[in-house]
Image: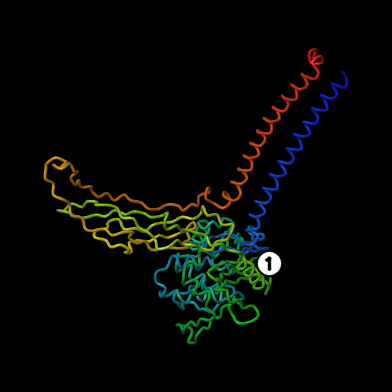
Amino acid sequence: MLSQAWLCRAGRHTFEREIFIKAIISLLILYLGLCQITSVYAHIYAEDVPELPQPSYSAASVVLMEASTGTILYATNAGEIKYPASITKIMTALIVLEHTTDFDERIPFSDRAIFTTPRYSSHIAMDVGETLSVYEALYGLMLSSANEVSLALAEHVAGSIEEFVDLMNRRAQSLGAYDTHFANPSGLPGAGHVTTAYDMALIMREAVQHPLFVDIIRTRRFDIPPTERQPEVRALRNTNRLIHEGAYFNEAVVGSKTGWTNDAGHTLVTYAEQDGRRLIVSVLGGGSPGTFVDTTALLAYGFQLPFEPTKIFDAAANMPTVPIFQTTEGIRTEIGRLPLRANDNIYFYLPPEFDTSLLRYAFSIPQGLAAPIEEGVVLGSVAMYVQDFRIGSALLRAAKSVPEYVPEPVVAATPYTAGGSVAYVPQYYQDDYSYIGAYEISFWKSEIFLTLVVPIAMSAIMFIISLVVHFAKRKKRLRKKLHARYARYPEYYRYK
């Protein structure tokens, strides 16, 4: 009897070991399959995103930003509060550009603008009562970093320096530069005059949207003609060594704004372009010529990053329609709707970390088109934006021809003719069309879902099915063995 009980326990342990071994094997197969999937997926991106050596720099705070999208590609102490020095003049120039319509208007230099500017600071030796055009003053501001020019521009634009500084601070807040506060338009040390490397990159990103600003910062030399008090030409030379021939020249750099005070150290904000990419580098708390060396290293790192061609507009999926109208007997009626199409899909090189949900598009479409219209005629446009920055556009053309509509005469007073056809009923024009939407890439069609989520889900389903089949077979085998034991040891199981 003892040997029979032992045999039963031994058989039960054998089955349990069999189940355990099969479960381990199944899990191992599932694990190896998932490893293969994820390794292939990782290998794809390992080829696209090579390991790059980290840039070396000596400045306290640095930011590398992709200018079109505002994506931060590299940063150290980006939000640390620092003194800006003369890179403040980027915001000064931005306010002047946004509030000026006549750049030939002459600016008089007041006593305050001249005598509150320390003679040891940057200036171009302007005198009281002397005038410059706004255009010339902007060159003096950005190339020579002239402090008296910044004060004269502030008084000209806002009426007073205090009002101008208020404009600067409100504009900084609107750009998201929340850690920035300006006390003056020049950048000289002042109570609470602070910023961050990230905030200055944001401000430069907005400023380079103005073509005149870009033209100014890329200029190596500018000559101010004689004025009322100065019979000779003032030759202004850009303080940015990155655009001058020499040891620090960088052909990708479009322009920069330099700054220096004892408290701030050397500061530099740079805008660069290469192969269709636009980068901004903000360096605060650096040395001389360390800011130029740091900027070159950061730009080299940024231009090597593997930007990906991303479809920002799908021509087939975005075909808006516009109403077509015709005036008949003085009544304007809608006779149909015409689809518009772009010639091609639009791609833009974006960093791999870019969030495509930030993309949006806006259509510019006429509201009152009249037939006839030929196929292929340009009728509107679409612009792609990242937040408020335009990164692409395309023309929209008529997808088909629309002939002139000639209504058939109504032969009966009822809405139906004798033949049963419906008579033409005018649809009165309503100007209530809106064509602004957001471009989104579906997650269900994304590479991550198709190459990672789907295989994992299928593997999990197959594993569950295999477990169900295994336990069903196990139950059947146990039942057969139990019947065999009953037949072999009837006396034992009779008493159990």
Residue 202 seen in render: no
**In this view of the protein, which residue sits in the foreground, 468 or 233?**
468
Judge by depth and name the residue closer to the eye, 263 or 400.
400
- The spot of residue 334 in percent (x, y) is 24, 51
Q: Residue at x 63, y 40 (%)?
A: 462
Residue at image mark 1: 55
Which residue corresponds to the image point at 79% horizontal and 34% vertical from the top-left?
A: 17
The relative height of residue 196 versus residue 140 in the rendered view (above or below) is above
Instruction: Classify 453 as above or below 107.
Output: above
> Quick one: 5 or 46, which is closer to the camera?
5
Q: Position of residue 241 (x, y in %)?
A: 61, 77
User: Looking at the image, how many numbered discs can be counted on the residues?
Assistant: 1
* Position of residue 15 measured from the top left corner of the image (x, y, whole percent): 77, 31
- In percent of the image, x 64 and y 66: which residue is there? 284
Q: Position of residue 67 (x, y in %)?
A: 54, 64
How has the structure been colored for display?
Answer: rainbow
Helix, strand or loop at disc 1?
loop
Where is the N terminus found, in terms of image quarters? top right
Q: Residues within 10 Å of mark 1 (few under 14, many from 20)?
A: some
The furthest residue to the right: 2
- For residue 19, side relative to residue 337 (left or right): right
Given residues 254 and 488, the one toward you in this image is 488
Can you say which quadrant of the picture contains the C terminus?
top right
In the drawing, does residue 493 fall left or right of residue 466?
Answer: right
Residue found farthest to the front: 487
Hey, what amino acid is under mark 1? Pro
